[in-house]
Amino acid sequence: MPLLGLLLSNLLTALVAWFAQYVTRKVAFGGAVVVASSALTFGLFVVFRGVMTMADSALSGLPAMFVKAFFMAVPPAAIPCVSAYITIWTACGVYRWQQDLIHLFAKSN
């Protein structure tokens, strides 16, 4: 039994050594950059979809009396438009910042 354990241990060690040699640091890092950029782009897409859905739902469903009183001071589409603009501007800033960090980290290795 100890001989079988030693054999399996040596095979696993050899497999890990071969895999480490085959998948170099640069290839693994390139894959990590692609995955991080894809995740960041997907996150930005989700934020955009969420903001547009919230803006769409904010324009309907309020009581008529509240809407009339509120629109005396604020145009009807001001709040959803301004909040959507600020949210998307912030999301784009975070996206660009993260993308720059990924590029700087990629250049350092």
Image (cartoon, helix red, strand yellow):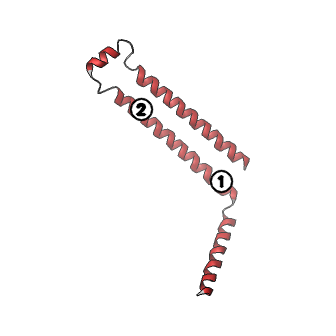
Residue visible at 60% across and 36% down in the picture = 96
Where residue 54 sits: x, y (%)? 39, 32
> Which quarter of the figure has residue 83?
top left
Find disc 2 in the rendering and name its residue. 52
Find disc 1 in the rendering and name its residue. 29
> Which quarter of the figure has residue 10?
bottom right
Residue 82, relative to residue 42: is it above or below? Answer: above
Residue 44, relative to residue 23: is it above or below? Answer: above
Where residue 17 sits: x, y (%)? 68, 70
Callout 1: helix, strand or loop?
A: helix
CA neighbours of label 1 inside 10 A, class few (<14), some (14 to 19), many (20+): some
Callout 2: helix, strand or loop?
A: helix
Q: Residue 62 vs residue 4: left or right?
A: left
> Which quarter of the figure has residue 7?
bottom right
The quarter in which the N terminus is drawn is bottom right
Residue visible at 67% across and 65% down in the picture = 20
Residue visible at 55% across and 33% down in the picture = 92
- Which residue occupies the extreme right position in the image? 108
Q: Residue 72 vs residue 28: left or right?
A: left
Q: CA distance from mark 1 to mark 2?
A: 35 Å
Residue 96 marker:
none
Q: Amino acid at mark 1?
A: Phe
Asked whether the beta carbons under mark 1 and mark 2 sit within 8 Å of each other, the answer is: no
Q: Amino acid at mark 2?
A: Met
- Identify the mark nearer the N-term, 1 or 2: 1
- Which residue occupies the extreme left position in the image? 64
Where residue 75 sits: x, y (%)? 39, 15
Taking depth in this image into account, of 23 and 3 the one nearest to the observer is 3
